[in-house]
Image (cartoon, rainbow, N blue to C red):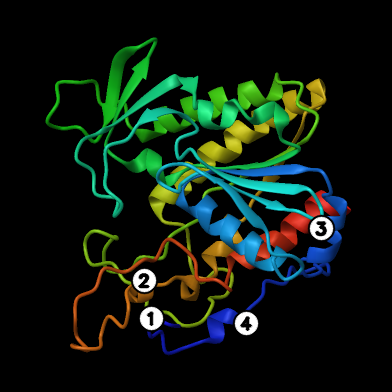
């Protein structure tokens, strides 16, 4: 709004499930129940977006102390002092070990290097000390990437200028998720682990790098919009790998749950910053060409409904 977005209805829409009442997130009750507990949200910039939503709601009760950040402010930690409740965001966009070569705007200078048989220590080293986790990944697997196993290059995705086996992102996503889930289900972890499904973007007439826009100012109804092909592929792999892991988790006494927010997020093409990630982008030219953000979410906005679902799963379920 500060950047000049003229409409405001996106602030007030709230998802309502068909056959039950979903109470709104209760920040007081949540903090009371989470005394002396530690949470972490683990993943990419959508995870950062999510932790911002959660912090905004909880800060109505108490302002948290920001107690840690890494050099790039990508991994951070806050404490709600009256409750000794800790919440962290851990930057791990692939969940497995990766070397990433890109600037703050997401422009790559070289292919990412992904080790499909090594978990990212940024979250694994904290894993057993966490009571609750929300783990997610997704879109980063579509980037130009070189794949390693046992320290040796085995192939790549979108690397036409290199003499490597073109394995593709489906191979890597399945392999990485299978490896992550296998670690979780055999970990004897006594807390609760939510795997959040990847969320769709709403770019129209292009992608983020090719003039894509998201001009809608209202939600769409179920059935009026479909997942894009690439997102559908990611989603199918997620659901298949989770189904296999869920069975093993139950056998091993690990509390692993699916947090599926993909479909409710698909209905909110109005909930993105669009061109208003920049300050008054059309002030000097109403027809200016502006890079849109149709992936991340405005706050308040659609992500807040995710917290209603989490409250139901964690506190009441």
Question: In x, y percent, where is residue 71?
Answer: 41, 42
Q: Mark 4 or mark 3, which is nearer to you? A: 3
Contact (CB < 8 A) between labels 4 and 2?
no
Residue drawn at point x = 40 percent, y = 51 percent: 229
Among the two numbered marks 1 and 2 on one chain, the one whose residue lies closer to the N terminus: 1
Disc 4: which residue:
12
Among the two numbered marks 4 and 2 on one chain, the one whose residue lies closer to the N terminus: 4
Is residue 89 placed above or below 203 in the rendered structure? above
Residue drawn at point x = 19 percent, y = 86 percent: 287
- CA gap between label 2 and label 3 equals 31 Å
Disc 3: which residue:
30
Q: Secondary structure at mark 2?
A: helix
Q: Secondary structure at mark 1?
A: loop
Residue drawn at point x = 52 percent, y = 53 percent: 48
Please state if 309 lies on the left or on the right of 36 as rendered: left
Disc 1: which residue:
3
Among the two numbered marks 4 and 3 on one chain, the one whose residue lies closer to the N terminus: 4
Contact (CB < 8 A) between labels 1 and 2?
yes
Say if residue 26 shows up in the picture.
no
Contact (CB < 8 A) between labels 4 and 3?
no
């Amino acid at each position: 709004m500060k950047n000049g977005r003229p409409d405001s209805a996106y602030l007030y829409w709230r998802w309502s499930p068909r056959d039950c009442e979903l109470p709104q997130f209760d920040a007081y009750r949540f903090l009371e129940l989470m005394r002396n507990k530690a949470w972490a949200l683990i993943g990419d910039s959508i995870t950062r977006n999510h932790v911002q939503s959660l912090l905004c709601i909880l800060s109505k009760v108490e302002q948290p102390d920001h107690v840690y950040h890494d050099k790039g402010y990508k991994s951070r930690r806050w404490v709600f002092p009256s409750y000794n409740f800790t919440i962290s965001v851990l930057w791990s966009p692939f969940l497995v070990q990766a070397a990433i070569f890109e600037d703050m705007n997401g422009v790559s200078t070289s292919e990412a290097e992904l080790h499909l048989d090594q978990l990212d220590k940024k979250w694994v080293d904290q894993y057993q000390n966490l009571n609750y986790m929300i783990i997610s990944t997704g879109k980063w697997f579509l980037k130009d990437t070189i794949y390693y196993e046992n320290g040796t290059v085995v192939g790549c995705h979108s690397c036409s200028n290199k003499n490597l086996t073109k394995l593709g992102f489906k191979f890597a996503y399945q392999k990485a998720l299978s490896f992550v889930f296998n670690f979780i289900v055999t970990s004897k972890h006594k807390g609760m682990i939510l795997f959040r499904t990847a969320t769709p973007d709403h770019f129209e007439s292009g992608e983020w790098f090719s003039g894509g826009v998201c001009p809608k100012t209202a939600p769409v109804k179920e059935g009026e919009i479909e997942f894009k092909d690439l997102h559908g592929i990611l989603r199918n792999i997620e659901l298949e790998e989770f189904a296999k892991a869920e069975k093993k988790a139950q056998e091993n006494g690990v509390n692993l749950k699916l947090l599926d927010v993909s479909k409710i997020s698909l209905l909110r093409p109005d909930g993105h910053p669009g061109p208003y990630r920049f300050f008054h982008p059309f002030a000097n030219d109403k027809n200016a060409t502006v890079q849109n953000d149709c992936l991340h979410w405005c706050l308040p906005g659609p992500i807040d409904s995710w917290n209603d679902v989490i409250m139901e799963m964690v506190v009441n379920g």
